[in-house]
Image: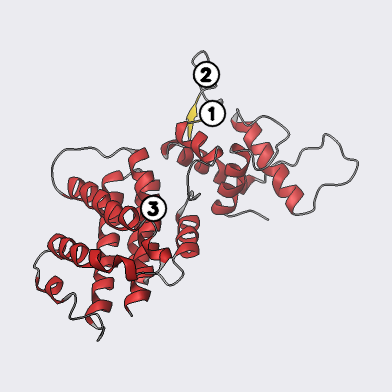
Amino acid sequence: MPHSYEELRSVALDILVGREMAPYEPTQYEHLSLGIGQVFAQREGRIQPGHFGATYPLDSQDKETLLELFWDLFRQGVITLGLNDANREFPFFRLTKLGQQMAQGQATYFFHDVSSYEAAIRRDVVDINEVTLLYLKEAMQAFRSGCMLSATVMLGVAVEHTFILLLEIIEASVEHQKTFASVFAERTLLQKFNKFRNLLEPMLKTLPTEIREDLDTHFAGILSVIRTFRNQSGHPTGKIIDREQTFVLLQLVIPYCKKQYQLMQFFK
C-alpha cells in the first residue's frame, strides 16, 4: 500500500538526521530510497528473520512521491546537491547548514511541515485561538514554499492578533479594566503595546513566577523582533528576509504565544 507524502517525509528526515539507521549511507538518492523502504518494512513488520541483506524497495507510487519530496527538501534548504566540492552533482546530496542544525537538535522546536509545526505549537499553547493558528500555519506553508516575505507577514499578523486577544480579556475584566484603561484609548497597536508594557511594569511582583520568568524576552522582545521583520516585509523596502531568519521567527513565535496565554489566564 502506498504511503502519504507526510509519512515519506517523516521517515526521510528521520534517516537524514540519524534517528533511523538505513542500510546505506544516505548520500545518494537511491540509497535514501532504499533506506526509506527498509524503515517502512521494519515498522510494518515485513522483515523476515534470517533474510540478511534483503532490500525492501518502495513501490512505484511511493517512488513518484519521493521524487517530489526530494526536490521539496532541496528547495526548502534542508539538503543540497553533491557530496562535496569535488562531486557536486545529483544523485549525490548532503544536508545543508539548516539540515545539520536539525540533526544536532539546535532548534528548540523541531518541525518540518505544517502538521509538525501545529503539533509543536499545541504542545506549548494548548488552547491557542484557531484564527491565530490559521495564520501561523499559513506562515509555515509559505516558508515551505520558499516565500519568506509572505511567511514573515503572516507571523506578524499572528503575534498582533494574540496581543489583541489579551487586551480583549483585560477590557472584559472587572478587576483589571480600570488599571489598563489608558491602553484602550491609544490609536495604534504599537502605542497600545508600549502603554501596556509601562502599566504592567509595576505589577511584575504580583505575577506568578512562571509568567515573570523571561517575560521581557518572550513577550516584549519577541513581539518587537517579529513586528520589525513583518514591517520590513509588508512595505516595499526591498529588504530580503533569508530562510534562516524566517526559520528562527517561526520558532520564536511559540514561546511568545505561550507567554501571552499565561498572561491571559492571569487577567481572566
Looking at the image, the residue that sits furthest to the bottom is 174
Considering only vertical position in the picture, is 55 above or below 213? above
Disc 2 element = loop
10 Å crowding of disc 2: few (<14), some (14-19), many (20+): few
Q: Which mark is residue 237?
A: none
Considering only vertical position in the picture, is 224 above or below 135? above
Query: Mark 3 or mark 2, which has the lower sequence index?
Result: 2
Q: Position of residue 131 (x, y in %)?
A: 33, 69
10 Å crowding of disc 3: few (<14), some (14-19), many (20+): many
Identify which residue, 101 or 139, lies in the foreground.
101
Identify which residue, 17 or 2, lies in the foreground.
17
Check contact, mark 2 vs mark 1: CB within 8 A: yes
10 Å crowding of disc 1: few (<14), some (14-19), many (20+): some
Residue at the image position 38 percent from the left and 44 percent from the top = 247
Q: Position of residue 114 (x, y in %)?
A: 45, 56
Residue at which label 2 appears: 84
How far is disc 3 from disc 1 in space, using C-alphas? 23 Å
Q: Which mark is residue 140?
A: 3
Disc 1 residue type (three-letter):
Arg
Query: Mark 3 or mark 1, which has the lower sequence index?
Result: 1
Query: Mark 2 or mark 1, which has the lower sequence index?
Result: 2
137 on left or right of 88: left
Disc 2 residue type (three-letter):
Asn
Q: Which mark is residue 94?
A: 1
Disc 3 residue type (three-letter):
Met
